[in-house]
Image (cartoon, rainbow, N blue to C red):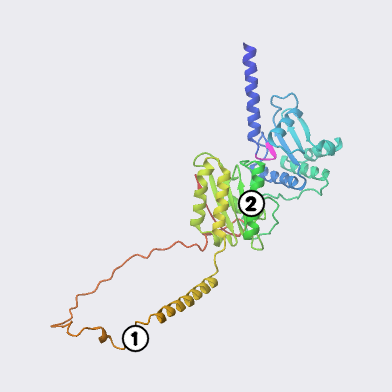
Amino acid sequence: MKKRIISIAIVFVMLFSFAFAASANSAHVIDFTDKLTDSEMIELDSYALTIEQKYGWCVMFAIVDNAENFDTTYEYAEDIYNAQKDAENGVLIVDNIGDNVYSVYLAGDAKNVFSEADEDAIWNAYDDADTYYGGIVDYYTAVDSVLGGDGISADPIITTAAADTEDTTAFERVERQLPLVVDLADLLTDAEESEFNEKFNAFTEEYEMEIAFLTVTSLDGKTAQQFADDFYDANGYGYGENDDGFLLLYLPGEDGQRELYLTTHGDAIYKMSDDMINTMLLEMKDDIISGNYIAALDTYIAKATEYVKPGVHFIWLFVFMLVGCVIALFVLNGMAAANKSVIRQADAKVYVRGGSLVLMNSNEVFKGTYVDKEEKVQENSNSGSSTHKSSSGRTHGGGGIKF
């Protein structure tokens, strides 16, 4: 009986460990030891995304206390990789700091591309660094080198601006490297991300204004407005010289803790009023609460299209009115010319029957005056949303809801 209870307990522990691993599916870096901050996790994930975009390879790193219920760290690494990613080719290092053991797991073609010397090199790149963050950056750089690249950028591609620096008006524009859909909270499947990236790119090309969507698991101590603004600015979002566009940030959570925030920049500020933004977010809210993110993003695109779709230019409105007046004039003249039974009279007396109207007495009485007052209704303006400055000193519009 005791053996049976122990066996059942082990099964439940293993199932729990699988579920726990699956819950960390939001990033290429898994940290069960809290060695990395949220901002470092986001930045490191961006490096992995860069490599994935360049080569189609998934590159991961995990820091753990032990190998859970597996006999070896290698088996644990294999389980983590298969639970997190479905990429055919990839590399994962697990640093088992509790057991002082590491393992390099190679998936697909990686077994043929990475030699034993390469495996040692990518581990040493990590191990020689002074910090966990710096070590993983060096590891990614070493992997990129093995794959034939020149190394990844020394600066993180994805960032929400330097959290520990003072606000500044100096801004250096960068080229966007990230996709228009960045799902760090892992709410969408790979196929869904690909589908909406295509839709967002089509929208951007047609209306010359970028549309983007970002999910996060933490705001890293910032407000939703600050995080969305900084993410937009620091990662090169926006179309053309003025970086026209908008980005929708979603932070999942319990009831009352979820947040949606739309940041706008450039011409998008003038395309979307505060009321428009609020309407859009409220229409998305119910679908998001129910987990129907596809419907919510479809609403996002539909409302964005409605708001930014160019209307008829006022010159053409003037032309249409002028043409209408000319046509109406010709029609009325034609109708008047066809009415032969009417003869123009110079005096109204012709229409009065003699003796039918007799005034016996007449006078005028002044009864007073009054003023009818009615409050003028202020119509909502669609000339743009309220604006503010981001930490980089750039002007943004936008609005958000918490639900």
Q: Residue furthest left?
A: 360
In the displayed structure, 67 sits above or below 179; it is above
Which residue position is annotated with label 1?
A: 344
Give the structural element (helix, strand or loop) at label 1: loop
In the displayed structure, 400 sits above or below 123; it is below
Question: What amino acid is labelled 2 in the image?
Answer: Lys
Q: Position of residue 331 (x, y in %)?
A: 45, 76
Question: What amino acid is labelled 1 in the image?
Answer: Arg
Q: Residue furthest bottom?
A: 346
Q: Earlier in the sequence, mark 2 or mark 1?
A: 2
Q: Nearer the viewer, residue 18 or 396?
A: 18
Q: Nearer the viewer, residue 164 or 341?
A: 341
Q: Quadrant of residue 216?
A: top right
- Quick check: 194 left or right of 249? right
In the displayed structure, 342 sits above or below 208; it is below
Number of numbered discs on residues: 2
Q: Position of residue 303 (x, y in %)?
A: 54, 54
Which residue position is annotated with label 2?
A: 199
Can residue 222 be seen here? The reply is: no
- Quick check: 193 left or right of 289? right
In the displayed structure, 376 sits above or below 153; it is below
Q: Quadrant of residue 106?
A: top right
Q: Nearer the viewer, residue 78 or 309?
A: 309
Boundaries of the magenta span: 26-30
Q: What is the crowding at mark 2: few (fewer than 14 residues within 10 Å), some, or many (at least 20)?
A: some
Q: What is the crowding at mark 1: few (fewer than 14 residues within 10 Å), some, or many (at least 20)?
A: few
Can residue 374 be seen here? The reply is: yes
